Image (tube, rainbow, N blue to C red):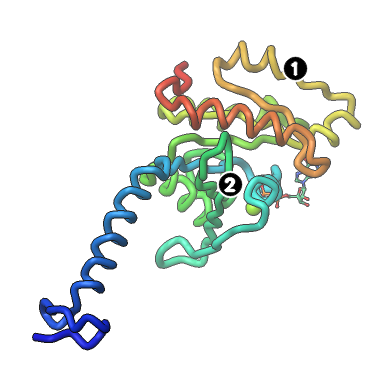
Amino acid sequence: MVCNHCRNSCKTFLGISKSIWACLWARNKFKKLSNRLIPARTTIALVGSPNVGKSLLFNLLTDGYTDVSNYPGTTVDIAKGQAIIAGQTVSIIDTPGMYSLIPMTEEEQYSRDFLLTESIDLVVNVIDAKHLSRMLAFTFQLMEIQLPVLLAVNMLDEAEKLGIWVNEKQLEASLGIPVVTLSAYQKRGIQTLKAKVGNYVTTPALSYSY
Ligand SMILES: Nc1nc2c(ncn2[C@@H]2O[C@H](COP(=O)(O)OP(=O)(O)OP(=O)(O)O)[C@@H](O)[C@H]2O)c(=O)[nH]1
Ligand SMILES: [Mg+2]
């Protein structure tokens, strides 16, 4: 068969000219090569009680590049976005608030099922600095089921107004997991959070053990 796509009237195979085959071959090769160059995607889930600032933190980390979808078959929202952390693209997921792994509401049940069934590399447990001891109960539950947990103690601005000071280093030593104190509202502590998440992203083999 003679090709009509180029001036040289080259031969065709399956009605496609040699030059187009060459182009498709090159594109496929480039795709395979670029797939190898893109680092493996890390997934980070923001988890915690309602109203602790997960969504505000999610927006700060993802710069607004988000995709909100319903958990299959429900009206429960799961927001997904991307962030560049330690030079790598990571997926960030904002989950609906839950108080514990024993669900009382539909939202809590989907958040829990999501945590237990999805492949999540790091759980950022966001808690309110004003209610530290109460909220740590949920942190212990997450640690107990062997999830890699980073504790983000948020609402520092409000806690400080009440005279509550959180010692990040001491908390880290006591719990044996990375801890970041922050105020999402004041955009305080975000870089430290990114750096500590970055440690995990670049060295997942060193995942925290307790
Ligand atoms: N003062 C102060 N307010 C904050 C901070 N972080 C979040 N907030 C506010 O707290 C409220 C709740 O924040 P969200 O981000 O919606 O909380 P959430 O954890 O996503 O809540 P759910 O989606 O209901 O689980 C909002 O009005 C935020 O602006 C903070 O660090 N300091
Ligand atoms: Mg939210």
Amino acid type at circle 1 is: Asn
Label 2 vs label 1, nearer the camera: 2
Which residue is located at x 25 percent, y 73 percent? Answer: 20
Question: Measured from the top left, where is residue 163 in percent x and y?
Answer: 89, 24
**Residue 138's quadrant in the figure?**
top right
Amino acid type at circle 2 is: Ala
Question: Measured from the top left, where is residue 55 in percent x and y?
Answer: 66, 51
Q: Are marks 2 and 1 in contact (CB under 8 Å)?
A: no
Please name whichever residue, 190 or 15, is drawn nearer the observer in this view of the structure. 15
Which residue is located at x 56 percent, y 41 percent? Answer: 47
Please name whichever residue, 197 or 54, is drawn nearer the observer in this view of the structure. 197
Q: Where does the N terminus fall, quadrant-wise?
A: bottom left
Which residue is located at x 21 percent, y 70 percent? Answer: 21
Q: Which mark is residue 143?
A: none
Which residue is located at x 41 percent, y 45 percent? Answer: 38
At label 1, counting other C-alpha atoms closer than 10 Å, the crowd grade (few under 14, some 14-19, many 20 or more) is few
Q: Which mark is residue 83?
A: 2
Please name whichever residue, 104 or 180, is drawn nearer the observer in this view of the structure. 180
Q: Is residue 44 above or below residue 94?
A: above
Question: Measured from the top left, where is residue 28 in percent x and y?
Answer: 27, 59
What is the secondary structure assignment of the residue under circle 2?
strand
Please name whichever residue, 102 or 66, is drawn nearer the observer in this view of the structure. 66
Horizontal side, residue 94 vs residue 12: left or right: right
Question: Measured from the top left, where is residue 191 in percent x and y?
Answer: 70, 33
Q: Which residue is mark 1?
A: 167
Mark 1 C-beta to ligand 1 under 8 Å? no
Q: Is residue 161 above or below residue 174?
A: below
